[in-house]
Amino acid sequence: MVAAEDNPESFFAAAPPLRDADAVAARLGEFIARNSSAAGAGGGGRRIVCVTSGGTTVPLEQRCVRYIDNFSSGHRGAASTEGSCQPYCRFLPDDSFLKFFDVDAESKVQVAECHAPVVKKAIGDYCKAIEGGYLLKLPFTTIFEYLQLLKMVATSISSAGPLGMFYLAAAVSDFYVPWDSMAKHKIQSGGGPLDMRLSQVPKMLSVLRNQWAPLAFCISFKLETDSDILIQKADMALNKYKMNIVVANLLATYKEEVIIVTDKERSTIRKMNKDEDLEMQIIKILSQNHSKYICGSTNGCVQSPD
C-alpha cells in the first residue's frame, strides 16, 4: 500500500471534502477569467498572484475540540499583498476590536475619533479592492482545507502561464493525523497519557511546480530556528522543488530581516528602522524577478507589475 506521504492523491482521497467546494470553484473561475482578460501595466495580460498566509491547524478529532497549530501571525502575507484572511486589518492598532468604537448618548455606535483616519482608510482600500474585482479571499483553517484550496487555485492559475505567481507564506503543517484514523469524538482525558502517531504531510511544492501550474513563478518561505541549517534548507527547496525563489528567515529575527535565495545569489534584506515595512522591500525584489521571468518565458516583456 502507498502511504499518503508518498502519494499526494491518497491524501486528497482520504481528506474530508472541502465545504462549499462548488461555490468556491465558481468564484475562483470568475476571478481568474476576469483578471486574465484584463490588460496589465506593461500592455500584456494582468498578473495573477496567489498569496497564502497564516497557519494551518491539524485536528485531533473529526468533531474537533483539540488541534495542533503552526506558528504564523499572517502578517507577512497581509503586509505583502493585503490579501490574507483579514485584509487591511494589519493597519489597525493591535487592540481589541471593540476599542475602535464609541457609543454616544443616544446609544449610537461610531468609530472612535482617535482611530477614525486609519479605520476609514482600511475600509476604503478594502472596498476598492473588492469592487474592482482584483481581490478574492479564500479562508482556510485546517491542513485539509489549505491543500485542497491550493490545488484548486493552482490548477486555475495555470491558465495564466508565466503571468501567474505563487507567494507561499503560509505555515504549512509538516505532520497530521489522517482523517480515517482520527477519533470521531472528543478525546477523553480519563484514560491517562495520550500517545498519538502523526503522519507526514505530502510535499506539495513539487506537485504544484510540475503538475498543477508548471509555468508559474513560485516563491516559497523557509522558517527555521537554527541558523546553521537555514540556507541549506532554502537551497534544498530550490533544487528539490524547483522554486524560483526561497525567502529564508529565522524565527527570532523574521520581523527584522530575511534572506532572498535564488540559484544565482543570496541577498539579505534588513529593516532599517521601526517604521519601515520590510515586506515592501521583499515585494519589490520579487516583482522585479517575476518581470525577468516573464520576459524570458514570452515574446513580450512586462516591465512593471500590475
Image (cartoon, rainbow, N blue to C red):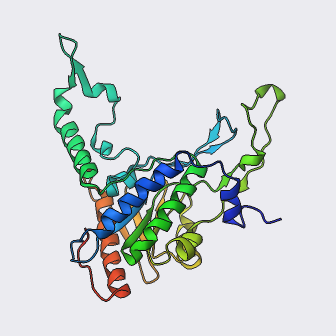
Q: Position of residue 44 (x, y in %)?
A: 26, 77
Total marks shown come to 0
Decide if residue 84 is in sight here: yes
Farthest bottom residue in view: 299
Res. 52 image quadrant: bottom left
Frontmost residue, 37 versus 68: 37
Please tell me whether residue 86 is drawn above or below residue 293 in the rendered image.
above
Residue 246 visible in the shown view: no
Is 13 located above or below residue 244 in the figure? above
Q: Nearer the viewer, residue 193 or 121?
A: 121
Q: Residue at x 42, y 80 (%)?
A: 265
Q: Is residue 113 left or right of residue 49?
A: left
Pick the residue in front: 109 or 155.
Answer: 155
Q: Nearer the viewer, residue 97 or 181?
A: 181
Residue appearing at x 56%, y 74% in the figure: 211
* Residue 189 x, y percent position in the rendering: 77, 27
Viewed as shown, does residue 283 lie left or right of 110?
Answer: right
Residue 282 lies in what quarter of the image?
A: bottom left
Looking at the rendering, which quadrant does residue 119 occupy? top left
Q: Residue at x 41, y 62 (%)?
A: 50
Position of 113 relative to 14 (above/below): above
Residue 154 horizontal/vertical position (percent): 49, 66
> Percent from the top left, x then y, of residue 107?
22, 12
Q: What is the quadrant of the N terminus in the image?
A: bottom right
Q: Is residue 120 left or right of residue 70?
A: left
